[in-house]
Image: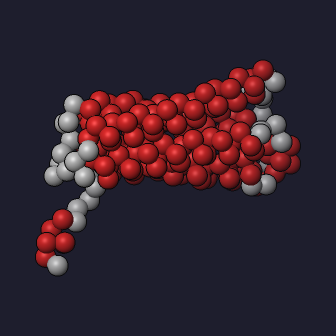
């Protein structure tokens, strides 16, 4: 029992948790602003939302959650001492994230082509701000995934010291969590 308690720890490091808390606070403010504005301008939000493709948002969700699954498997794989296998899992996570980026860029291009840009109306102002802010987090997460894959390939993570790997994967899970909330708020709820 004492050995089990000794092995339990906060994954990653405390600084990353504070960073994630700060980022989640910003996202919470944006989501609340979106929700309150939707209540105040429900007709505009309803008609504007019809320009969005729910199928596209489902593919976006699958790609991000797949990346999170691969990243979580990478941590477990390093714990078993298989760092190079973990590198391939992290590259798979990176590829899944790249699918998200390509789909999101196509969606942005489509909406911009329709003239539904940041200044079109309040819905699209908030849509571009919230999803753009999230998109930047995805790009940072991809850099982190690539860096961790390289470190795994170089055998720089050990089962006894995974805080850097755990911190990066926790960041990615924050990106996933935010999207799981954004998906229904922006694309589904009326």
Left or right, 146 with respect to 96, comes to left
Residue at 75%, 44% in the rendered image? 54
Q: Is residue 45 left or right of residue 88?
A: right
Single out the residue that lies furthest toward the bottom.
1
Which image quadrant is residue 155 in?
A: top left
Residue 90 vs residue 126, the one in the foreground: 90
Q: Report whether residue 23 is seen.
A: no
Q: Position of residue 96 (x, y in %)?
A: 52, 37
Residue in the image at 32% along x and 53% along y = 76
Where residue 7 sits: x, y (%)? 18, 65
**Residue 170: x percent and y percent?**
37, 49
Q: What's the coloring here?
A: secondary structure
Instruction: Report the side of 171 relative to 39 (left or right).
Output: left
Q: Position of residue 59 (x, y in %)?
A: 66, 41
Q: What residue do we see at 51% from left, 52% from top?
A: 177
User: Vertical placement of 172 versus 36: above or below?
Assistant: above
Residue 188 seen in render: yes
Residue located 13% across and 76% down the image: 2
Question: Going by the image, does 44 lie left or right of 188?
Answer: right
Q: Can you say which quadrant of the picture contains the N terminus? A: bottom left
Res. 71 image quadrant = top left
* Residue closer to the observer: 77 or 166: 77
Front in this rendered view, residue 85 or 76: 85
For the C terminus, the quadrant is bottom right
Q: How many marks?
A: 0
């Amino acid at each position: 029992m004492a050995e089990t308690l000794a092995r339990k720890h906060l994954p990653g490091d405390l600084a990353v948790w504070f960073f994630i808390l700060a980022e989640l606070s910003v996202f919470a403010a944006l989501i609340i602003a979106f929700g309150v504005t939707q209540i105040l301008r429900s007709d505009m939000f309803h008609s504007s939302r019809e320009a969005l493709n729910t199928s596209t948002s489902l593919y976006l969700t699958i790609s991000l959650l797949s990346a999170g699954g691969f990243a979580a498997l990478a941590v477990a794989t390093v714990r078993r001492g298989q760092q190079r296998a973990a590198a391939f899992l992290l590259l798979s996570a990176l590829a899944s994230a790249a699918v998200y980026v390509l789909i999101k860029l196509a969606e942005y291009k489509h909406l911009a082509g329709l003239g539904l840009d940041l200044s079109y109306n309040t819905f699209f102002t908030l849509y571009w701000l919230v999803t753009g802010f999230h998109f930047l987090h995805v790009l940072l997460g991809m850099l982190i995934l690539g860096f961790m894959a390289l470190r795994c390939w170089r055998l720089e993570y050990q089962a006894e010291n995974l805080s850097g790997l755990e911190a990066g994967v926790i960041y990615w899970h924050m990106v996933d969590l935010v999207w799981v909330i954004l998906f229904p708020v922006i694309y589904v709820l009326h």
